[in-house]
Amino acid sequence: MRRFPEPISNLVAAFARLPGVGPKTALRYVFYLLSQPKFDLEVMARALTQLGERIKTCPRCYTYTEREICEICQDPKRDAGLLCVVEEARDISTIESTGMYSGFYHVLGGTLNPIEGMTPDTIRYRQLRERLESEQSIQEVILALSPTTHGEATIMFLQKSLAPLGRSLTRLARGLPLGATLEFADEVTLGDALKGRKQL
């Protein structure tokens, strides 16, 4: 690969660390930025710096916030009987956008994947268990994890290990998405859709 000036090479290396960005895409990003006005680059640099300086992790639910405790955890109107367990902080905004959930959250920080070193000790399982032991108001724990192999393994682990705490454990329903055709549905999704059918 052609040698570039050090600032270009450094930024290419930084972009290449982002998920889904390879060296060629990173180089394309850098050359795009080089064509932008210096003022725009300064604005972007300030935004990146503020991200590191001002954003912290909520000590209660582990989402990202500017405050000591995030807005959701401080909201007295939320349903204290519901706790939704998600993989990553970004999943909270997805669930909130539905307008159908009014409880609190717990961010695990990943799913179980022993091959990549993701064990119960590396995700926030201990914090979840401690929260359930200390907050007796929580009646239902919704396991809102992605229906991947690792998500399913994590749900099974949580179901088994949290059952002795006596809380209702639920998971998100699965089925056919709107606009999908039966021809292209996989067997698991179609099977779940059949099991979760509703009376008309």
Image (cartoon, helix red, strand yellow):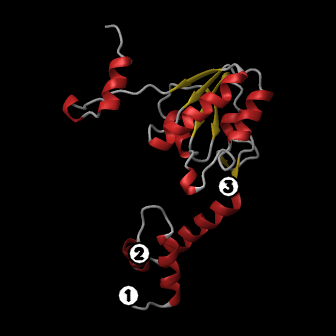
Q: Quadrant of residue 84?
A: top right
Q: Spatial distance from mark 2 to mark 1, Cα to Cα?
A: 10 Å
- The mark that comes first in sequence, 3 or 2, is 2
**Residue 23 - label:** 2
Residue shown at the point (42%, 73%) measured from the top left = 26
Please state, as top left, top right, bottom left or bottom right, where the C terminus lies in the image.
Answer: top left
Local SS, label 2? helix
Q: Mark 1 or mark 3: which comes first in sequence?
A: 1
The mark lying in front, picked from 1 and 3, is: 1
Residue with the most extreme right position: 134
Residue marked by disc 1: 1
Q: Are marks 2 and 1 in contact (CB under 8 Å)?
A: yes
Q: Which residue is drawn at 67% across and 48% down?
A: 65
* Gap between marks 3 and 2 measured at Cα: 28 Å
Nearest to N terminus: mark 2 or mark 1: 1
Q: Which mark, residue 55? A: 3
Task: Please identify the residue farthest to the left as the structure is shown.
Answer: 183
Give 21 or 32, whichever is nearer the viewer: 21
